[in-house]
Image (tube, coloured by chain):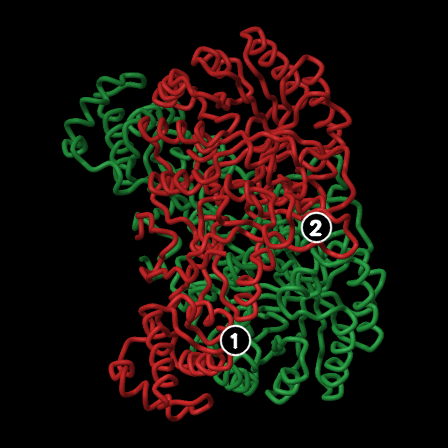
Chain colours: A green, B red
Amino acid sequence: MCPHVPDQSNPNGEEMVPINTSSQPHIPPPVPAGTNGTQPNGHQSNGVDTNHHSAPPKVKSHKDMYGRASDFLSNTSNWKIIESTLREGEQFANAFFTLETKIKIAQMLDEFGVEYIELTSPAASPESRAHCEAICKLGLKRTKILTHIRCHMDDARLAVETGVDGVDVVIGTSSFLRDHSHGKDMTWITKTAIEVIEFVKSKGIEIRFSSEDSFRSELVDLLSIYRTVDKIGVNRVGVADTVGCADSRQVYDLVRTLRGVVSCDIETHFHNDTGCAIANAYAALEAGATHVDTSVLGIGERNGITPLGGLIARMMVADPEYVKSKYNLPMLREIENLVAEAVEISVPFNNYITGFCAFTHKAGIHAKAILANPSTYEILNPADFGMTRYVSIGHRLTGWNAVKSRVEQLNLNMTDEQIKDATAKIKELADVRTQSMEDVDMILRIYHTGIHSGDLKVGQSAVLDKLLQKHMPSREGSPTRDSPNKKVKVDV
Amino acid sequence: MCPHVPDQSNPNGEEMVPINTSSQPHIPPPVPAGTNGTQPNGHQSNGVDTNHHSAPPKVKSHKDMYGRASDFLSNTSNWKIIESTLREGEQFANAFFTLETKIKIAQMLDEFGVEYIELTSPAASPESRAHCEAICKLGLKRTKILTHIRCHMDDARLAVETGVDGVDVVIGTSSFLRDHSHGKDMTWITKTAIEVIEFVKSKGIEIRFSSEDSFRSELVDLLSIYRTVDKIGVNRVGVADTVGCADSRQVYDLVRTLRGVVSCDIETHFHNDTGCAIANAYAALEAGATHVDTSVLGIGERNGITPLGGLIARMMVADPEYVKSKYNLPMLREIENLVAEAVEISVPFNNYITGFCAFTHKAGIHAKAILANPSTYEILNPADFGMTRYVSIGHRLTGWNAVKSRVEQLNLNMTDEQIKDATAKIKELADVRTQSMEDVDMILRIYHTGIHSGDLKVGQSAVLDKLLQKHMPSREGSPTRDSPNKKVKVDV
């Protein structure tokens, strides 16, 4: 019904008003008690706190400051993306990618900096094969191209002829899939896997072997086949939560165990049916996995997999400098808009990083602290992603600190006492209906004029009501739901 | 721009066609090798596998079958919801709830079965106070009413007069919030907390004390104040990831440590900025937490908190019988639609359980297995939520098993060989553009007629093309993107 992509910063068409246009840099948090005196810095791009320090402190991540002692297994500062929008994403209900769209997506992901893209099997259809060949001929700058095939020699022969840099082989190992999908036992699976792997390796390209539905497979079967394929030299083994059933501790345990069994890289693939796809990817990296499968906006079978943007958000907490050094983060929104348009969905209101409310602060207590230091209520810095912070103001939960910022922007000369008094009136009016930004501005201007003309004194609520009625006569009959969240953009 | 709530089962207006209307029950998976012979059963509502067993097996959860050994700390089969749509949710950018809307939401949550609802502080505004009092007078059947206040005697005095069943007290304990929000030290916090707690307790209602931004607070400070408030008799202590920075292992570690320090209940509150709000809630319950804060669709400050539906999805994997015994699951969609409408958002395309694609299967290999046994690619049974499973058919990744189901529904007399042949043609045509359900039906009918009239034989692709051109002349010029995902409803 809404197959277009809204402007995510402005979902209801309300205006966004910059409240503080100074170029004050993002202020890093102060040194917490009990830490080692360097700056916690999940946010700052240059490591310099121009307000507190004369020399740039060493940049430390949130994890360094607040996390556990360092873990020798962890790869949260050393991991790669296998971007599967053009494979898993093509299995999304709404997806029908033309070659032109696929090329655009591939090129943007290359520019963003993903290490791999994964394409639908050339065995799926003649067009899939032609698309795969065409994308291999693009000459992407950085991104390697994989295709994803069943563990079958016919598929492997097709795949190696397309020009891909590597082949991702998958086979179901759970009893569910062995009984209801391919009907093969572990002996057959192992034998076929060896044949396919050796064939692909003989062509000099990368090979990954993955089980499907790994978390409902027998652990001993899994480890056994992984050890076998590791010994014959796969580049990666893959662990997949195909049905989205795994929790983070299970993931940590399985990957940690696997890390002790194989020497190759470990790729992970998590479906999001029960909301753990991002956390599970993170747990896997903590346990020694090396690669994470993503898709743009998480599109895939059912409700999809680990979303590219959500994974980036998560990893920025662990090591912002690593993430920023590898990926062109401000492109995220453009890539998401491209894919959303191609598959005719809206970016979810609550999308990580780029959702319209991801950096919107509303409660008075939050607004106050955000204005003092954004790190109080933000673990991500919107500026890293080309995004902007907003503080919502004309509602019943507003606070006088947010109003004060607006007063300063309007260049009104008001004392804190007067601002608190005006804020009380805004809250009173907002109790009846949310106030638009124009309403808030008018109230502040009328209040200001009243004070300076001598018509109004602090605390004269009834007098202020009369002034408002006189100067804002049209207020009473105006609609209440047209602009529910006039927001104030703040540059702090 | 799209402030209405679409029919989530039918986002693009395409028709849904039931492919198999028999009332065949959801078939549980077979017994995996190496297990104890009872049925894994994340799905089944009656525990009976009518295909494989004559007597109903004992119902076992997914976790029992595939999880770790049981953990004495874990509360994943014994936990409660504190539903905060009317507090945290009111801090969502778009939220402006009238009393009428608040009452509807409260009544539906009561009917759904949440143990608690949490309301905005009566100190926030006069209207907030009036709403709180009105909701307390509703006489909800099951749900207790809480209000959420700052750790301040003024707020506490207002709160206890509203008629609530309990008060949730919060104060920032991280250095960020101590420095930039309330400006108080831990001594002041502890002293004030004791005063507020003893006052609320003296009124005979429940009291919770929570830190804010717990994961960026000093562990020793936290444990110290929690121990103090536990000793003076709070009902719950609260752990809050206010900025959404925590990962699941951190959560598990902190809650497990806290579980050894306090004897009261442990409530948890997780923001979703980095995509871990559901996984963190689950990890907390595994470590001994007792209560999880949720909001409908996760609405709250920024991109929100643990969503009610997402938490339910997660917990269904751990213990479906427990969840089904406590909550009226088919109401979930109605509650989400109510809240989405009230705050003028669309339910995200990929929403847990109720998103339009949550139970849609597309890849041929998935469709085949789903038709054999839904548990192959589903960890949740849509029927538990009053939802329906769909198999997508008219696209280039389709498989002959899905087409066979459609053939049977159309009562066409075709052999498997003929169906495979017709499927090849559907895939070939779908490579050019996604085929509508009408197109697929027409292709099958024309194929069927051709075979039975003797005009067509298996493998005669060119003859079939001519028949299609003759009987479907309007196909060529038809638009390609109007109906990208004609889906087939399957009752299996």
Residue carrying label 2: A60
Q: Amino acid at mark 1?
A: Ala
Q: How many marks?
A: 2
Q: Residue at x 58, y 49 (%)?
A: A274
Q: Residue A326 in the image: x percent, y percent?
A: 63, 66
Q: Quadrant of the N terminus of chain A?
A: bottom left
B81 vs A227, left or right, is left
- As measured in the structure, the alpha-carbon distance from the residue carrying label 2 to the one carrying label 1 is 33 Å
Q: Residue B8 in the image: x percent, y percent?
A: 38, 52
- Camera-side mark, 2 or 1: 1
Q: Is A165 situated above or below A331?
A: below
Q: Is residue B446 shown to the viewer in this render?
A: yes
Q: Residue A174 in the image: x percent, y percent?
A: 70, 61
The quarter of the picture where residue A445 lies is: top left
Q: Residue at x 48, y 23 (%)?
A: B143
Residue carrying label 1: A106
The quarter of the picture where residue A463 lies is: top left
N-terminal-most mark, 2 or 1: 2
**Label 2 Cα neighbours within 10 Å, binned few <14 / some 14-19 / many ≥20:** some
Q: Chain of mark 2?
A: A
